[in-house]
Image: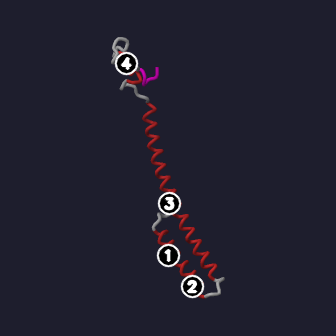
């Protein structure tokens, strides 16, 4: 028998399962039955849960960085195409929208955690 099963088996036999109907159905149902690997499994499960939470947070932060990259690329696009318009107000309008997006993106970037070093 496995080392963790022997004490449970002996305790189960002490309940006289052959003659008593209220005895547990088997040694595995006894409180003395301990699986040594169960403690390690709980520890690994807790570590996996912590790693999952950390990974979810890192993924969320990465998504925010990508969103800010798109805003900054949009700024470059708007400023780049503004020179192709003959109407001066259209150029200034695109540059103004680009400037507003730039300010928004920089504020968003300042609120994000710095990349790991």
Q: Position of residue 86 (x, y in %)?
A: 65, 87
Marks 2 and 3, the one that precedes in the sequence:
3
Per the image, the residue denoted by label 1 is 103
Asked if the residue at tag 4 contacts the one at tag 1, i.e. Cβ–Cβ closer than 8 Å, the answer is: no
Magenta run includes residue 6? yes
3D distance between C-alphas at marks 3 and 4? 54 Å
Marks 3 and 1, the one that precedes in the sequence:
3
Q: Position of residue 88 (x, y in %)?
A: 60, 88
Q: Nearer the viewer, residue 89 or 25?
A: 89
Region in magenta: 1-7
3D distance between C-alphas at marks 1 and 2? 16 Å
Q: Residues within 10 Å of mark 1 (few under 14, many from 20)?
A: some
Marks 2 and 4, the one that precedes in the sequence:
4
Asked if the residue at tag 4 contacts the one at tag 2, i.e. Cβ–Cβ closer than 8 Å, the answer is: no
3D distance between C-alphas at marks 1 and 4? 73 Å
Number of numbered discs: 4
Q: Residue at x 59, y 84 (%)?
A: 90
Query: Majority secondary structure of the magenta segment?
Result: loop
Per the image, the residue denoted by label 4 is 12
Q: Quadrant of residue 67?
A: bottom right
> Considering the numbered disc 4 on the image, is that residue within a helix, a strand or a loop?
helix
Observer-side mark, 2 or 3, equals 2
Question: Furthest residue to the top?
Answer: 19
Q: Position of residue 35 (x, y in %)?
A: 43, 29
Q: Position of residue 5 (x, y in %)?
A: 43, 22
Per the image, the residue denoted by label 3 is 61
Marks 1 and 2, the one that precedes in the sequence:
2
3D distance between C-alphas at marks 2 and 3? 33 Å
Check residue 92 in the rendering and tell me which mark sits there, or answer none: 2
């Amino acid at each position: 028998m496995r080392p963790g099963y022997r004490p449970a088996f002996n305790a189960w036999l002490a309940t006289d399962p052959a003659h008593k109907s209220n005895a547990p159905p088997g040694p595995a149902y006894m409180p003395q039955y301990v699986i040594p690997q169960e403690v390690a499994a709980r520890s690994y499960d807790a570590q996996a849960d912590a790693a999952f939470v950390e990974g979810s947070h890192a993924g969320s932060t990465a998504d925010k960085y990508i969103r800010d990259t798109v805003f900054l690329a949009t700024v470059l696009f708007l400023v780049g195409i503004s020179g192709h318009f003959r109407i001066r107000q259209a150029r200034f309008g695109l540059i103004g929208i680009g400037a507003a997006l730039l300010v928004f993106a920089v504020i968003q970037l300042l609120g994000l955690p710095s990349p790991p070093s």
